[in-house]
Amino acid sequence: MALMDFIKKQFIDVLQWTEDGDGTLAWRYPMAEMEIQNGASLTVRDSQMALFVNEGTVADVFGPGMFKLTTQTLPVLTYLKNWDKLFESPFKSDVYFFSTRTQLDQKWGTPNPITIRDKEFGIVRLRAFGIYSYHLTDPKTFYQKISGTRDIYTRTELEGQLRNTMVAGMTDLFGESGVPFIDMAANQDEFGKAMFAKAAPMFAEYGLALDSLVVQNVSLPEELQKILDQKIGMNMIGDMQRYTQYQVANSIPDAAKNEGGLAAMGVGLGAGVGFGQVMGQAMGAALQPTAAAPAVAAISADDVVATLEKLHGLVEKGILSKDEFEAKKAELLKKLT
């Protein structure tokens, strides 16, 4: 019995790996002091590959299948060890198994906003995130550049490198394309395709194939998003003079209906429309300052109406005289003209 245990400990007849589903990408067969029996069986399951390494030099690579290990099936190892065709002795070699299954639902994103130069907004900081999938295609490259002589190399250990690779590609993509942020954000599908084309060669450098990449969101930090919303609002308004006239025409008649409101000052609907025209003209001029005159802060029609309402309330309470009210009203209108 002890003799049988000794034999089993020293020689390996079957080489195989049963994945445990924990995200392992590379696994080193535990050789210890054992040797591989000449003619031993190598089983490589679907979605696996195997790699023989002789004293640090990559030798033979096997895809899925069952193989009898001889000088015929191990040509590179045979060359490295200077075996002849009749070699039948046990031999030592490091054997690594690799998982080629597709790694699904991997997350990528910008942990912090990245700074880019945008065609429309200048220097902006943006965030983006999404999902991607990949699988291992070249065990030799992966072994040489990533996993090395580790006993186990997992998907989790690789996540940070892959995420940073994609974020770097995204930054370069914005810089090279010249496409404004607003266009990228509005068409995330095309943005994802462009990112895929940028990132795929980077994955290939590690012996990986990028299978899919989806952009789920592209956004600005909150403070910059507010500025963008204001810009969009200004574009939607368009003709500020007509917008101001519309605002005044709607707000002053409402105030004129209230007892003690603008109606008490003799300002009716007709006066409100006329006031709106004056206000609109003034606002239009304020938004287009000339080189000879310094720009002044714009005053909205709503602000004027609200101020007049408050001043009239002071007149009714006896705090402000009617003359003082008229003078103040004239001062407000003068600012607009």
Image (tube, grey):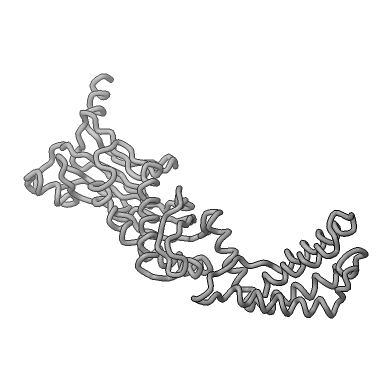
Quadrant where the N terminus sits is top left
The answer to whether 264 appears left or right of 159 in the picture is right
Write down the quadrant of residue 278 in the picture.
Answer: bottom right
User: Is any part of residue 68 visible from this angle?
Assistant: no
* Residue 257 coordinates in the image, percent (x, y): 90, 69
Task: Write the residue at 82% across / 78% down.
Answer: 271
The answer to whether 3 appears left or right of 192 in the picture is left
Q: Along the line of sight, which residue is nearer the eye, 221 or 45? A: 221
Q: Along the line of sight, which residue is nearer the eye, 125 or 88? A: 125
Question: With respect to residue 264, does 32 lie above or below?
Answer: above
* Residue 238 coordinates in the image, percent (x, y): 62, 77
User: Is any part of residue 336 visible from this angle?
Assistant: yes
Question: With respect to residue 135, does 69 lie above or below?
Answer: above
* Residue 317 coordinates in the image, percent (x, y): 89, 54
The answer to whether 273 appears left or right of 155 in the picture is right
Task: Write the residue at 82% across / 62% down.
Answer: 309
Task: Write the residue at 51% across / 65% down.
Answer: 185
